[in-house]
Image (cartoon, rainbow, N blue to C red):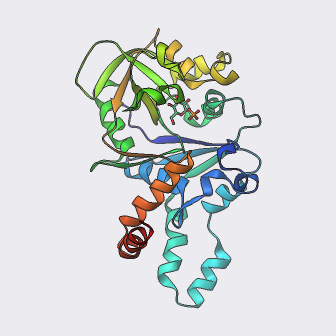
Amino acid sequence: MTKIRKAVIPAAGYGTRFLPVTKAVAKEMLPIIDTPTIEYIVREAMESGIEEFLIIVSSNKNSIIDYFDNNFELEYQLAQKGKIKELSLIKDLPSKLNIHFVRQHEQLGLGHAVLCAKEFVGNEPFALLLGDDVYVGNGNPALAQLVDAYEKTSSSILGTLKVADEDVSKYGICKPAEESESRLIKLESVVEKPALKDAPSNLAIGGRYILTPTIFKYLETQTRGAGNEIQLTDAILRMMSEEAVYSMEIDGSRYDIGSKIGFIKATLEFALNRDDLKDEVKELLNSLK
Ligand code: G1P
């Protein structure tokens, strides 16, 4: 059994849903309270056993590269002033990470972004985490749940969630191969952003994947699909003619931070879970009613 050691995180999109701020700030650097959203994703992957990261960036995303590097000047200043707690906040993560970056020169879609990871991944299965989906797993991080499932199937696994009818057209939707109550199901097909009348189920792909390297063969020849973009879901569908693909329903809370209301919800719920903030935030919320 090959261990899942590598993770790919696409972070090259324009972030148009968060304009005007994303004109000059990478969407992935927008903070939930005081921590960039991409750090939550990286930490989830580390807690799931990932050892090596590739972040796919575009030309205006240098702040992400800086963020995962050491800032020696600031570290020196904080050390001089004896600000040990603040020092560990900026120093600990970069020194633990084995992280690489690659540029996606044209934004042709998620499938095209993932293809930029081909050389980094090589010939082993890997994890893919999308930055718009932040999870708080029930006991076990979302990606770790997929890694456990991979240990049973040795096949690609799509992390899923059940969505309401009015939301199916926003997601990749899975068609299970058979009816089952199990969280881990073999799939017959997948379709990207179907109209409700064409959706085979309510089981949506939720931004977490374990993929075998076979996917690259299909991405290389993938033509444009929904939204005129090169879609990962379409390449996964074609890969199914060669290899089994499963879905695993993720146990935990998911925040769609690609939407404004999802971002606000994440901010409030994360604050309510922090000892340094929860009392004041509760008071604030009560005063607003
Ligand atoms: C992407 C995927 C889609 C998936 C979604 C999850 O779509 O293409 O299959 O369901 O992420 O967040 P996007 O939201 O980037 O359009």
Q: Is residue 75 above or below residue 42?
A: below
Q: Quadrant of residue 275?
A: bottom left
Q: Residue at x 52, y 86 (%)?
A: 83
Q: Nearer the viewer, residue 138 or 50?
A: 138
- Report the side of 170 relative to 148 (left or right): right
Identify the residue at the far bottom of this view: 81
Q: Quadrant of residue 192?
A: top right
Q: Nearer the viewer, residue 205 or 156?
A: 205
Q: Residue at x 42, y 21 (%)?
A: 174
Residue 80: give x, y in percent of width and height. Answer: 59, 90
Q: Residue at x 47, y 8 (%)?
A: 241
- Report the side of 174 relative to 231 (left or right): left
Quadrant for the C terminus, please.
Answer: bottom left
Q: Is residue 44 above or below residue 240?
A: below
- Report the side of 285 relative to 218 (left or right): left
Residue 89: give x, y in percent of width and height. Answer: 50, 72
